Image (cartoon, rainbow, N blue to C red):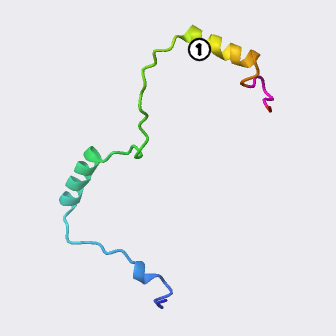
Amino acid sequence: AHADEADGSQFALKFDTNRTRAEVQAEAVVEAKTHNMEPAGSRVVTYQSTADRAAVRAQAAEAVRTGQIPSGEFSAM
């Protein structure tokens, strides 16, 4: 363990204060154009289904009738 200042000065950020306002604004413009706000992994892979809607509904109805899947608000099995 290491002792340090109680104010947390070991975590102080270092800033380059020698840059001009124009340099900072130009960097901000580039960052705004290239920065992606979309979280990593948030894209969903699309899948083109070949299933027929009526066939799927019929299979679901059959599964409910045979007790394979629950139905209604209370679905404890």
**Image quadrant in which the C terminus is located:** top right
List the residue tagged with mark 1: 56
The percent coordinates of residue 46 (x first, y second) are: 42, 27
Residue 39 in the figure: left or right of residue 25: right
Is residue 36 magenta-colored?
Answer: no
Q: Which residue extends farthest bottom?
A: 3
The residue shown at (59%, 14%) is: 56
Label 1 element class: helix
Query: Camera-side residue: 17 or 30?
Result: 30
What amino acid is at disc 1? Val
Residue 37 in the figure: left or right of residue 65: left
Magenta segment: 70-75
Q: Which residue extends farthest top?
A: 54
Vertical placement of 43 versus 7: above or below? Answer: above
Query: Camera-side residue: 25 or 34?
Result: 34
Crowding around mark 1 (Cα neighbors within 10 Å: few <14, some 14 to 19, many 20+) is few
The count of marks equals 1
Magenta stretch mostly in which secondary structure?
A: loop
Vertical placement of 35 versus 8: above or below? Answer: above
The picture quadrant where one finds residue 70 is top right
The percent coordinates of residue 55 (x first, y second) are: 58, 10
The residue shown at (23%, 59%) is: 24
Vertical placement of 50 versus 5: above or below? Answer: above
The picture quadrant where one finds residue 73 is top right
The residue shown at (22%, 55%) is: 27
Query: Camera-side residue: 65 or 1?
Result: 65
Query: Camera-side residue: 73 or 26?
Result: 73
The percent coordinates of residue 76 (x first, y second) are: 80, 33
The residue shown at (50%, 14%) is: 51
